[in-house]
Image (tube, rainbow, N blue to C red):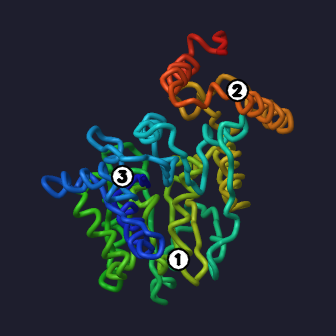
C-alpha cells in the first residue's frame, strides 16, 4: 500500500504505477474518499482477495473495511503530513509489514527516531538529471516593486509564478497577507496581460483540483495559494515562488514549498518576503534556508528549534523524554546500543514465533505507556 496526503498526489502515483504495471507484474488500484458506491465496494473486494496487489490512496486506506490479503509493505509518502496515529493505523492493517517512509524534510520526531536507532535511513542525494538547486533569497518588504518587476519578467518569458500567503481571507488575523486580497491586488497590477488563479483549502475539492490542473496545463500564469500546494503539484514550467510571512511556516514546510519550483530545466527561485517585525531568531531560520537545500540539514535545524516530541507518545515536536542534543553528540554510542539490542533479539528464537505476535503487541502497548516507561522490564 502507498499512502499519500492528497488526492492529487495519490492520482499522480497511481498513473506512474499503472505505467510500470506490466513490466513489474503490478495490479494497482486507487482508493480515495471520492470513490463511492458499487465502484468502491468492488475495489475493496479486489484488494481483500489479492487481485489488486498494489493499492495507492489517501487517508482512506486506514478506514475500517480496508483489508489486505497479505500485507507486506506500507509506503508512506510525504510522511511529515501524517500524524502518528495515521501512520500506525496503516501498518496495523497487517501482521508486522515492512514500513518505508518518504520525505524531503524529516519532521523532528522522525529525525530523533533515526538517532535512537528506531529507523534506518536511505538517502537519495542526486537530483533528477538536468535539475538545478533552487536559489533562495530573503526580500525586504520595501523592495516589493523590484520583486513585482522580476515576476513580470519571468511571466513575459513564458514561465509561471506561485505566491503563497498564510491566510485565506483578511478577517483571519490583522496584518497577515491573505490569498483573496493578494489575488485581487495582483489582478489589478497585471491587468489583462496575465491570468491569475487562486486556490486554498476552503474551496470544494473538485474546484481546487480544477484550478491546480489549469495551472499545470499553463492556462494560468500566476497562482496565489495557501500551503495546500505544499505537496503533490508537479509543474515543470513554474520557476518562481514567493512566500509572504515566511516566519509563519516551519523550516521543513518552507523547504517543501520551494520544492514546487525549478522542477524543469530552468533554475527555480524562492523569494521569502521578510516582515519588518521579523525577530533575530526568525532571521536565523531564514538564513538556514538560504544557505542550504539539504533537507536533512534543515530538519536538524528544525529539530534543535522545535524539539523532537515524544518517541513513546503522540506529540511530534516539543521537549521529549531525552535531551536530543546529548544523543546527537554521541552517535557512536547510539549505534553501539542499537547493535547490542539487535544481537539480543536475533539470539532469542522465541521472539520470532508467530504465536507470540499477540504478546509482542501487548509489550509494545506497555512500552508506549508513559506512566510505565521506563520501569517495565520485559523478558
* N-terminal label among 3 and 2: 3
Residue drawn at (56%, 11%) of the image: 371
Which element carries disc 1, helix, strand or loop?
A: strand
Residue at the spot of label 3: 58
Q: Is residue 11 above or below residue 48?
A: below
Q: Nearer the viewer, mark 3 or mark 2?
A: 2
How far apart, in angstroms, are the residues tagged by discs 2 and 1? 55 Å
Distance between mark 3 and mark 1 Cα atoms:
28 Å
Mark 3 → mark 2, Cα distance in angstroms? 38 Å
Which residue position is annotated with label 1?
239
Give me the residue at 51% from left, 83% from top.
154
Q: Are marks 3 and 1 in contact (CB under 8 Å)?
A: no
Q: Position of residue 251 (x, y in %)?
A: 60, 50
Q: 61 or 82, which lies in front? A: 61
First reached walking from the N terminus: tag 3 or tag 1: 3
Image point 51% across, 79% down: which residue? 149
- Seen from the viewer's position, the closer of residues 72 and 90 is 72
Q: Nearer the viewer, mark 2 or mark 1?
A: 2
| Cβ atoms at labels 2 and 1 below 8 Å apart | no
* Rendered view: 87 above or below 145: above
Indicate the position of residue 45 as horizontal and vertical percent values: 24, 51
Of 230 and 340, nearer the camera is: 340
Q: Which residue is mark 2?
A: 348
- The reply to whether residue 329 is visible in this rendering is no
Amino acid at each position: 500500500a502507498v499512502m499519500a496526503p492528497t488526492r492529487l498526489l495519490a492520482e499522480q502515483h497511481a498513473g506512474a504505477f499503472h505505467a510500470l504495471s506490466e513490466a513489474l507484474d503490478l495490479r494497482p488500484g486507487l482508493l480515495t474518499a471520492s470513490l463511492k458506491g458499487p465502484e468502491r465496494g468492488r475495489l475493496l473486494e479486489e484488494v481483500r482477495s489479492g487481485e489488486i496487489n498494489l493499492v495507492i490512496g489517501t487517508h482512506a486506506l486506514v478506514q475500517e473495511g480496508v483489508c489486505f490479503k497479505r500485507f507486506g509493505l506500507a509506503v508512506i509518502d510525504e510522511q511529515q503530513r501524517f500524524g502518528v496515529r495515521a501512520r500506525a493505523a496503516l501498518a496495523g492493517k497487517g501482521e508486522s509489514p515492512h514500513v518505508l517512509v518518504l520525505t524531503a524534510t524529516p519532521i523532528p520526531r522522525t529525525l530523533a527516531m533515526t538517532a535512537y536507532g528506531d529507523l534506518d535511513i536511505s538517502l537519495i542525494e542526486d537530483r533528477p538529471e538536468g535539475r538545478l538547486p533552487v536559489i533562495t533569497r530573503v526580500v525586504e518588504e520595501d523592495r516589493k516593486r523590484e520583486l513585482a518587476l522580476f515576476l513580470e519578467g519571468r511571466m513575459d518569458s513564458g514561465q509561471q509564478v506561485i505566491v503563497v500567503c498564510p491566510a485565506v481571507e483578511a478577517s483571519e488575523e490583522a496584518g497577515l497577507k491573505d490569498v483573496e486580497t493578494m489575488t485581487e491586488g495582483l489582478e489589478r497590477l497585471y491587468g489583462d496581460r496575465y491570468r491569475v488563479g487562486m486556490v486554498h483549502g476552503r474551496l470544494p475539492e473538485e474546484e481546487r483540483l480544477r484550478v491546480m490542473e489549469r495551472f499545470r496545463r499553463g492556462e494560468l500564469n500566476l497562482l496565489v495559494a495557501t500551503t495546500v500546494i505544499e505537496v503533490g503539484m508537479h509543474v515543470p514550467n513554474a520557476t518562481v515562488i514567493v512566500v509572504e510571512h515566511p516566519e509563519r511556516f516551519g523550516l521543513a514546510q518552507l523547504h517543501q514549498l520551494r520544492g514546487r519550483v525549478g522542477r524543469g530545466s530552468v533554475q527555480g527561485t524562492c523569494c521569502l518576503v521578510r516582515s519588518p517585525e521579523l525577530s533575530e531568531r526568525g532571521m536565523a531560520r531564514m538564513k538556514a534556508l538560504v544557505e542550504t537545500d539539504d533537507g536533512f540539514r534543515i530538519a536538524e535545524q528544525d529539530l534543535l528549534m522545535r524539539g523532537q516530541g515524544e518517541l513513546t507518545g503522540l506529540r511530534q515536536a516539543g521537549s521529549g523524554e531525552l535531551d536530543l542534543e546529548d544523543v546527537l553528540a554521541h552517535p557512536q554510542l547510539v549505534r553501539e546500543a542499537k547493535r547490542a539490542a539487535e544481537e539480543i533479539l536475533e539470539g532469542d528464537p522465541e521472539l520470532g514465533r508467530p504465536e507470540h505476535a499477540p504478546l509482542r503487541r501487548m509489550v509494545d502497548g506497555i512500552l508506549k505507556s508513559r506512566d510505565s516507561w521506563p520501569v517495565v522490564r520485559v523478558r
